[in-house]
Amino acid sequence: MLTKYEYDKLGNLVETLTFSVSGLSSSQIDTHIADRDNAITISQTLYDESGRVLVTVGPYDADATTLPSGTENVYDSLGRIVETRRWAAVSIKLVDLVVSGEVIGRETDPVATVANAWDGVTPATAPTNIGWESNLDLPVIIESATLDADLIGPLSYSKTEYDTAGRVDYSTSIEEVWDDTASGYIFKEQRTTYKYDVAGKQTEVIDPLGYTVTAYADGIALSLPDGIERPKVISTGGLSVDDDHKTVTTYDGTRRKKVTDAREYESGASTGDFTTEFTYDVLGRVVTTKHPPVKVDGATAVNVYSHVGYDGLGRKVWQSEQTTESDPSNLDLDQDCRQFTYDAAGRLERVSLP
């Protein structure tokens, strides 16, 4: 196998092709890879005017009869990726880069004005060439209550929003499922929210199950060329926090004291059943982890622990398996722990299992 890399005039890698060259001589290889139709797989990348990756495609089978799906990145004014959209049948408009009559690489179509998918609003008139297409047409973002047959939005998307301190405030993705009660598709905005304390430490993560989401479609699915169906949205509901499915972290100073799993807040859960607690030594190293209670063969749930021991140089010299023993001094290192041995240079030399 041989891999060929194509760059644009700015040195950006815009295309990668793989070829099978088994049994070919050097001169035959040069001729073989000069023809892109001989490629086995192709990957392509489109960059914006700032040199950031805007759209990626592949690697995909060069002999495929349908175009591959591709990923589009959307950036905010600070250069952060705030949205990722997945589109069907994506093609990037690349042409040969010719200098002095010789092809030296590939580049974006010179007449294209590279841009993200059109939102139907700005600019007021649909652009004619943004450097890439979906289903051989201009990719258009659909967020309105109706969806015209020739304006099919992205297959899926994920979105990230930041607070004023630059921390992730929440992330959102879309899930489309059929709902028998609604007799149509339900578009679920799968949102995860992050909360922080005054020191900037993450204290809560409210996952998608901690929200009530409603968004319905009329059940009429549009057929894309590759057979993928996308429903028409006719109504969209909002997000409301139930606050019953979140992961909560509490701290002892700057150290994690305990982490409570989201299942703790589900209806009927027993307090403490899904909490992990950490104990530290005077140097701030974790020495004991108290895990959530477990049941063995239907018996009453018991707490389990894991312990770690260090030598005078701060190296981990033993680590216990999970055990019901809460006091590490009662452990038999040979029976209950993995032990670590180091050489004179401090390199890990051996791990002895219990």
Image (cartoon, rainbow, N blue to C red):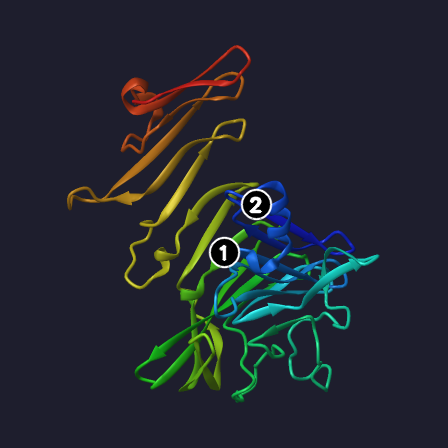
Q: Is residue 289 above or below residue 206?
A: above
Q: Is residue 60 above or below residue 127?
A: above
Determine the image quadrant of residue 113. Answer: bottom right
Side of 229 where 16 appears, left or right: right
Q: Which mark is residue 90?
A: none
Q: Quadrant of residue 137?
A: bottom right
User: Mark 1 near mark 2, Cβ–Cβ under 8 Å?
Assistant: no
The answer to whether residue 329 is seen in the rendering is: yes
Numbered label attached to residue 204: 1
Name the amino acid, label 2: Leu
Residue most extreme to the left: 298
x 49%, y 83%: residue? 236
- The residue that appears at 63% across and 44% down in the rendered structure is 27
**Few, some or many C-alpha atoms within 10 Å of disc 1 (few <14, some 14-19, many ≥20)?**
some
Give the amino acid at mark 1. Glu
Res 15 → quadrant = bottom right
How many callouts does the rendering have? 2
Residue at image location 29% in from the left, 30% down from the top: 325
Query: Is residue 218 or residue 300 the one in the foreground?
Result: 218
Q: Nearer the viewer, residue 64 or 311?
A: 64
Q: Which residue is mark 2?
A: 2
Where residue 114 appears, as percent x and y from the top left, is 72, 69
